[in-house]
Structure formats: C-alpha cells, structure tokens
Image (tube, rainbow, N blue to C red):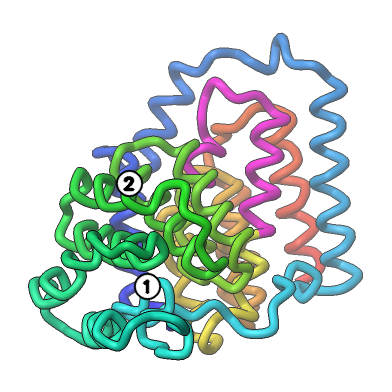
Amino acid sequence: MASAAWLAALALLLGLMGTHRPEDVCARDAANAVPAAQTEDPAKIQAALGAWERMWDELNTEGVGALAPDIRIAGARYAGDTCGMRYRRLYRGVDTETRERLVIAAFANDPETKQQLLHPLLDSPDVRIRARAAVELARIALRRGDVDAAEAALGWSAGVDLPPSCEADRHYLEGRIAVHRGDAAAALAAFTAANTRDPGYWNAYRDRLPVLIRVLHEPSHGAAACLRHARNLIEVLGLLPQLADDTRQFAKLARSLERFGAQSSATLLASGVAWLWAGEEAHGRRVLSRALEAPELLPTACERAMRTRIAIALEGS
C-alpha cells in the first residue's frame, strides 16, 4: 500500500538531488544557464506548445479522470512484499522450503532475519527465485543506505524475465539507486519503466515528481524540453488521485509540491492544480496567485506558457 511516510521519502529524494535548497539550485542554474533558446528550433517549441495545450484541452473537457491510469487493481506495495513475496499462489512449481522462506521473509520485521532467509536463495537453480530474492535484498540494502550493495544485489536479477509486477519493482529500485547517484535522467527512465510494467505503481509515480522538477529546471535545456517536462509533471500528478488511498493522501502530495515549489511558476502551477484536484479550491487559488509572482527561471516560451495557464486556472477556479 502507498507508504504513510511518503513525505519523508519525497523530501529525501529532493535532498539527494543536491545539497542546496531547490530554489538556490535553480537560481544558480538560471544565472549560469546556456541560452539554448537562442539556437532552438522554433518548430520544436511550437510542437511542444501544441502538446501542452492539447493536454489542458483534454483536462478541461474530461476532467482529471482523463489522465487516470488504465488499471483494474492499483499496484499497491506492502512493506516487504517485493515481487509479491507474501502470496504463496505466485510460487507454483516452487518447492515448499523455498516458498516458506520467501513468505516468512516477506513478513519478517527484522532486516537481518530477512537477509538470512533470502541470501541462500541466491544459489537456487531456479533463476526466477534468484532474481526475486535479489530484488528484495536490493530493497533492504537501500533502506539501510547501502547503495553499492543494492546495485550489486540487482545485478543478480539482470536479464531475467520476471513477471510484470516484479519487473516493476526492479525498475523502481533502479530509479532509487539513480536518485542516490544523482543521475536524474536514469532515475526518470527507471521510474517510467516501472509504471510501464505496472500502471498502478504509486511510489514510482510519486518519486518521478521531484525528478521531473529537477530536469524541468535544467539550464541547458531549451523551451521545448521545459514544456515537455512540465507536461509530464502535470500528467503524472493527474494519475495519482485515482491511486491515492483517500483525498488526504493526495492533499499531502499537493502540500509537498508547494513546499518545494517556490523555485518557479511551473512547480507552483503543479501544486496549485493539485490542491484544486484535492478539492481545496481556496488554497489552490492562493498557491496559483503566488505562482504569478514567482521568479522567471524558465526559458521564455516555457515561462510564458506557465503563466498563461496559471491565469486561465485562476479565472476558471
């Protein structure tokens, strides 16, 4: 199930992207920015603007449900349930001792106990069992902050054809490792791959948000890339209301975006819209009003598109 400690995780992800506050990083980057827009292809900017506006037209017509993921069962993840380890029915054809190790490890609270149960499975003749154990060992290593051990554990599962939900877990952990390494592009690709394999994976969507915020403000990117990442930010945000346990969980997500959104009009637009989707219209309007006063840190065409959309949102809310 989506973690109750998601706010701390989001703050950690943002913190791991750099040692400065987000607004400091963006202000510094803007000061050192390469004027990419001066050489950018106007046709690419127009195409990106068209995609940005089509998304909002769809939202205006169908509401936030237009962005909802195509799922039948939300991809909930319980603690210790990597690759569905809690469910015996997923281990057909597996010997009893191995199946019991996986189930007991899934329910064990002590990381050391989990490791003792799972490590012997890395020698299993069944490559699927080795891969499942490796993915959970990687998760355990990440929880204790040992990124190298997590990366090594995932290596055991490389190239193994896993069930979609288990492969989604593997990609998600790859994304978290990339965040720890400061590689925003790799993190974004991994989290996106996790959601491709499991469209209901809340944590992967949630953890994409701070990465998108980072790449959105990359100074070497031009207006087209800025618009593309801003559109992806809104699209990912719009996927989450259906997956949230309740409106309070989504409201907490909106609050976290507001907390880290002082850096630009784009992130405050995302926060304001999130508050509106959470049913908090008055607060959403206040955040959107602040967005119009945010420093102009984005390429000109992208900045203009953000502020135009903010004004429209204020008129319509």
Check residue 155 in the rendering and tell me which mark sits there, or answer none. 2
Amino acid carrying label 2: it is Gly
Residue 46 place in picture, x, y as percent: 86, 30
On-image quarter of the N terminus: bottom left
Given the current orientation, which residue lies at the most extreme top position?
39
Amino acid carrying label 1: it is Thr
State the residue at coordinates (64%, 42%): 229
N-term-proximal mark, 1 vs 2? 1
Residue 130 lies left or right of residue 137; in this view the side is right
Observer able to see residue 288: no
User: Residues in magenta?
Assistant: 212-235
> Where 219 sits versus 208, above or below?
above
Write down the residue under mark 1. Answer: 82
On-image quarter of the C terminus: bottom right
User: Is disc 2 placed on a helix, strand or loop?
Assistant: helix
Check residue 238 in the rendering and tell me which mark sits there, or answer none. none
Question: In the rendered structure, does residue 214 fall within the stretch colored magenta?
Answer: yes
Observer able to see residue 48: yes
Q: Which quarter of the picture shows residue 39?
A: top right
Residue 221 place in picture, x, y as percent: 60, 25
Residue 138 lies left or right of residue 219; in this view the side is left
